[in-house]
Image (cartoon, helix red, strand yellow):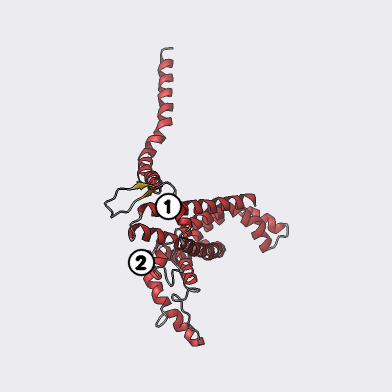
Amino acid sequence: MTSEPVSTAQRRRRRNWDRWSGYLFALPYLILFGMFLIAPLIYGLGISFFRWDLLSPVPPKLIGVANYRESFSDPYFWKALWATLRFVVMAVPFTIGSALIMALGLHSVAASRQSMYRAAYFLPTILTISVVGILWRWFYNSEFGVFNAYLSAFGIKVPWLTSTGVAMKSIALMTLWWTTGGPMVVLLAGLHDIPAQFREAASLDGASSWQQFRHVTIPLLRPVLLFVMVMNIIGSFQVFGQTYMITSGGPEMSTRSLVQFIYETAFNNYRMGYAAALSWILFVVIAIFSFGQFRLMRER
C-alpha cells in the first residue's frame, strides 16, 4: 500500500522526462537553427526596407517598400531573373530525367555490381565547383577544348561560352554532369523500397514493361520524385557557382543569375537594403514554384 504512491510519482517523473528529453536533445540544433537561419532571415527582411550603403557614413534610412518597387523597374533584375528561369527550365527536367533513367538502369543490374556503378555516377557530385569549373572551362575552350577537338573532325566549331544562345545551355550541360548523381541515388533508394510483388502481379495480369513502369513504378515512386524535384528546383534557382566560375555572367549578361546579381549588388555596389529585397523576391519565386510542384504532384 505504501509503495504505490512512490511508483506513481516515479512514473510521472519518467513521463515528464520522456516528454522534455526530446526537446533537450534538439535544443542545440534549435539554437543554431535560430542563430544562423531564422535570425538572418528576419534581419534581412528588416534591412530590405532601408536604404543602406555599406561604405557610406550616412546611417541606414527607412524607405518602406521602395527597394521592392525599384526592383520591378530594374532591367538588370528582369534580365537576371530571366537567365535564372532559363537555367531552371534547362537543368531540372534533364537532371531528373537522366537521374531516373540511370536509377532504373542500376535497379535492373545485379546487386553485387550496383555499388561500383553507383559510386562512379555519384563521384562528380563530391567535386567542388572550383574544380568542376576549371575542368569544364577547358572542355569548352573554343581553341584547344576537348569538345571542339572532336567536333572539328566533322567541320563543326561551337562557341560554347561566347555565344548568348549557347552559353547557358553549356552551363546547364555541365550542371547535368555534376549534379545528376545525387538525385539518382535517392531515386534508386526509392526503387528499392517498391515491393517486387506489385510488378510481379502486374506481369501476371499481362502488363507490359512500359505499363508496369507507368502504372506501378511511377505512382509508388511519386513521393520520392516530388522530393527530388522540389530540391532540384530550389537548388537550380540558387545557381551561382557555375555561372560565376564559367562565364562570370557573360556574354552580355546572358548567364548572370539572380543570385549573382544579388551578390554583386551587395558586395560590389554595397547596396545592402536593395540586395536584401532582391533576396526576398527570390525566396518568394522559389516558394511559388515549389508550392506549384506540390500541387501538381498531389493532384495527379
Residue 115 seen in the current view:
no
Task: List the residue tagged with mark 1.
Answer: 67
- Please state which of residues 128 and 247 is positioned toward the viewer in this rendering: 247
Front in this rendered view, residue 120 or 172: 172
Identity, as a three-letter code, of the amino acid under mark 1:
Asn
Left or right of residue 58, residue 118 in this image: right
Residue 275 x %, y %: 39, 55
Residue in front for this viewpoint, 124 or 235:
235
Q: Residue at x 39, y 54 (%)?
A: 274
Determine which quarter of the picture holds residue 71.
bottom left
Q: Is residue 20 above or below residue 85?
A: above
The x and y percentages for residue 39 are 37, 43
Label 1 vs 2, first from the N-terminus = 1
Q: Is residue 70 above or below residue 21?
A: below
Report the residue marked by disc 2. 130
Instruction: Depth check: give the residue in front, 213 or 75.
Output: 75
Could you classify mark 2 by the number of other residues whose Cα lies within 10 Å: few (under 14), some (14-19), or many (20 or more)? Answer: few
Which residue is pictured at 50% across the width and 59% down the height? 183
> Quarter holding the N terminus?
top left
**SS class of the residue under badge 2?**
helix
- Can you tell which mark lies on residue 168? none
Q: Position of residue 8 (x, y in %)?
A: 44, 19
Q: Secondary structure at mark 1?
A: helix
Q: Residue furthest left?
A: 57
- How packed mark 1 is, by other alpha carbons closer than 10 Å (few <14, some 14-19, many 20 or more), is some
- Residue drawn at (42%, 52%), measured in percent from left and top? 67
